[in-house]
Image (cartoon, rainbow, N blue to C red):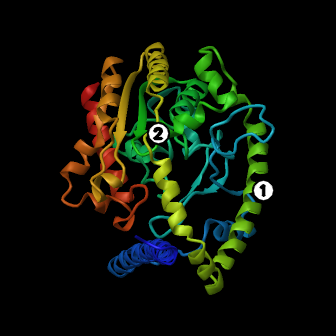
Amino acid sequence: MYNNKTFSTYTIIIILSLIFGIYLFEVYLNFKSIGREFNINKNIKTLKKEKNLDFDMRTKYEIFKSMKLGNKNMTVTVSPRVYNDPEKKIHFFSGISNSETIDCNENGYFSIYKSDRYGFNNPDSEWENNIIDYFLIGDSYTHGACVNRPNDIASILRDLSNKKVINLGYKANGPLSMYASLKEYKSKKIQNIIWMYYEGNDLTDLIHELTIKNLNQYLEDKSFFQNLMEKQDYIDKQNQKILIKSIRAWDNAREQSIKNSSIKYKVLKFIRLDKSKNFIKKISQSKKKTLPLKEFETILNHTKNIADDKNAKMHFVYLPQFERYKSKLRDDNFFEIKKIVANLNINFIDIDKEVFQKEKDPLGLFPFRNWGHYNEEGYRRIGEALFKKIENSN
């Protein structure tokens, strides 16, 4: 029979073992993080050597501050869904109009484009045409994240078809924003409406979108309309306010980054078990959520109604995520989404099947074979596949 002294000894051993195990796990996560960064840097260095690439290591904040000195008409992309109108009067879907716009850097350079009259990534002259052959809606992948024209999907379609293309894609758009932006900017005669669905986050983005009052009105009231094409001056002013707010946030992040790089702070983060806490938080957040498939179907149906009213052909393009090829992760909702699309009689284009499954090295279509958007070659292959599939279906 154990006495109190024996019990206390075992209790201390158990507690110390638990503490040791927890910190051992923290060590593992830190080494894993270091290994990941090493592999990324190794891939970058290898490709820098192969392609003679001068990788721009500046932050978006640094390049904006530098370029703004020589060009006052310079801005950056800021997700409308995340920030939007500070005064909450309207909900808009684009950036500042007629401006040199800095987006992102995943391929060694910062992508920059001249925004059109409505703040989207298009040559402004496209809006002068009465008939639009390809009308794209989507998120950052459609927007053309981290590549310059003519390497985004819309530009590739423009070059291959020699037809008119309007791109309403913007970073962080979810299905409700995509439908609403189409509703606001569909003033032209349209031949093809191309819905670009990204499997990585579109449905989870919709969860957030359904909580935004001004945005949710598009779903609750089919007649709801903000007439955004006539309000670009106001949208530009509100985007300027958002930009100022973002610059302040960048300043704070810069100071925090400098602080985080100190040995003292890294030791403190280790003692606090920061990586273990983040790991647990990520696991808890990754528990299967109830995804708004019913609302998604309603939104897609409303979009199909617009296509029918415009006498346009609608195409649903399913874009695969990096994890499909890195971790063999599959989207559990693929067949459910495909079924919804089929029931609405919408042409379904599976980019995994049409592009990535035909590649010996599908990771080669991502920046330096690392997580991110597609690289220039990836966008090109997708644009070519879309052109072929859409032209064959018409």
The residue type indicated by label 2 comes to Asp
Q: Mark 2 or mark 1: which comes first in sequence?
A: 2
| Residue drawn at x 66%, y 71% as measured from the top left | 62
43 left or right, relative to 19: left
Name above or below for residue 77 compared with residue 54. Answer: above
**Could you say where residue 233 lies in the image, as x and y percent from the top left?**
77, 38
| Residue drawn at x 31%, y 35% as measured from the top left | 334
Which residue in the protein does label 2 denote?
Answer: 202
Quarter in which the C terminus is drawn: top left
101 left or right, relative to 30: right
Front label number (2 vs 1): 2
Q: Nearer the viewer, residue 381 or 348?
A: 348
Dots 2 and 1: beta carbons under 8 Å? Answer: no
373 left or right, relative to 90: left
143 left or right, relative to 341: right
Quarter assignment of residue 265:
bottom right
Which dot marks residue 18? none
Q: State the separation of the CA atoms marked 2 and 1.
A: 28 Å
**Could you say where residue 344 lies in the image, as x and y percent from the top left?**
36, 18
Q: Look at the image and tell me whether residue 269 can be seen.
A: yes
Quarter in which the N terminus is drawn: bottom left
| Residue drawn at x 66%, y 21% as measured from the top left | 225
The residue type indicated by label 1 comes to Ile
Name above or below for residue 185 compared with residue 343. Answer: below
Q: Nearer the viewer, residue 42 or 271?
A: 271
Which residue in the protein does label 1 denote?
Answer: 244
